[in-house]
Image: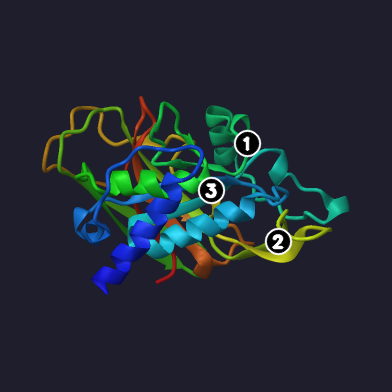
Amino acid sequence: MRFSIQILVLTCLLGLFSACDYIEGPKVDETAFPSSGNKVLLEDFTGHQCGSCPRAHEKAAELKEIFGENLIIVGVHVGGFADVDVADGYLNDFKTPMGNDLDAYYAPYNEGLPVGLVNRRAFNGKPLIKHPNWGTAISQILAEDPKLSIDIQTAYNSTSREVSIQTDMEYFSAGTPDHQLVVIITEDSLESKQADYSLPAPSYISSYKQLHVLRASVTNGTWGEQIKPAQIFVGERLTKTHTFVLNPDWVAEKCEVVAYVIDNTTKEVLQAQIAHVVH
């Protein structure tokens, strides 16, 4: 089994190294990832009118198979490709205020969709990464020692549709007042029309499953809330609690809570975690 996993990872990395936007990264042993404690946040900028975006969705699914629970994926629907177009049958509005803020800050259209962020870290001088190179960036981060751990506990009230969220953090290295906690809600397997340029005209899929769709920010605003207004010490444990009422149109059983800590100066994600709303 270990040998098979190593072959999968080697195949993935070799494919990535041959891509046009090469990202240097160390060769790593995937079997060490689960014990490293690191989890990586992949934010995929996408849209239902983006005919190239299904290739990025496929790459994200492939990487999820390889990296398992160490990889957390969020689909961020942004820009004109995510616009509603009733006349052409694109009826679903997956845009969010948070997604709009990320769109404005990172300007993914300058790179061209599909493109994404891997822990919002800059590789080769820029954080936006084309999907063939996501695996290399993920591997590099997963090989590093974690700076902290995150644990999420959720409780859901099906009558009020309120989810209570407890986020526990333990620091393995010192933190600063610039560290912010961000908590979001995602929803999985949402059916919509999706353009797909790999298909013959009219080049779309009428019932396409949109995965890991960003729905809302639980914490205040896009960049979260300060974890502590002073230095965070090694070994310190911190807890934050939040409540959020799910939109009546969302399926609670398909919703998940994603929590991550960012350095608010660099915006880099330092650690992430995910939990189901309904257990």
Label tally: 3
Element type at mark 2:
strand
The residue pinned by badge 2 equals: 192
Q: Quadrant of residue 154?
A: bottom left
Q: Quadrant of the C terminus?
A: bottom left
Residue 102 coordinates in the image, percent (x, y): 53, 35
Pick the residue in front: 178 or 192.
192
Separation of marks 1 and 2 at Cα, in angstroms: 22 Å
> Circles 2 and 3: CB distance less than 8 Å?
no
> Circles 1 and 2: CB distance less than 8 Å?
no
> Circles 1 and 3: CB distance less than 8 Å?
no
Q: Residue at x 65, y 50 (%)?
A: 94
Separation of marks 1 and 3 at Cα, in angstroms: 24 Å
Q: Quadrant of residue 65?
A: bottom left
Q: In the displayed structure, would residue 267 be above or below residue 3? A: above
Q: Residue at x 21, y 41 (%)?
A: 147
Q: Residue at x 41, y 26 (%)?
A: 125
The amino acid type of the residue labelled 2 equals: Ser
Q: Which mark is residue 250?
A: none
Element type at mark 1:
loop
Q: Residue at x 59, y 32 (%)?
A: 111
Pick the residue in front: 75 or 195.
195
- Mark 1 or 3: in front is 1
The residue pinned by badge 3 equals: 216
The 10 Å Cα crowd at callout 3, few under 14, some 14 to 19, many 20 or more, is: many
Pick the residue in front: 261 or 140.
140
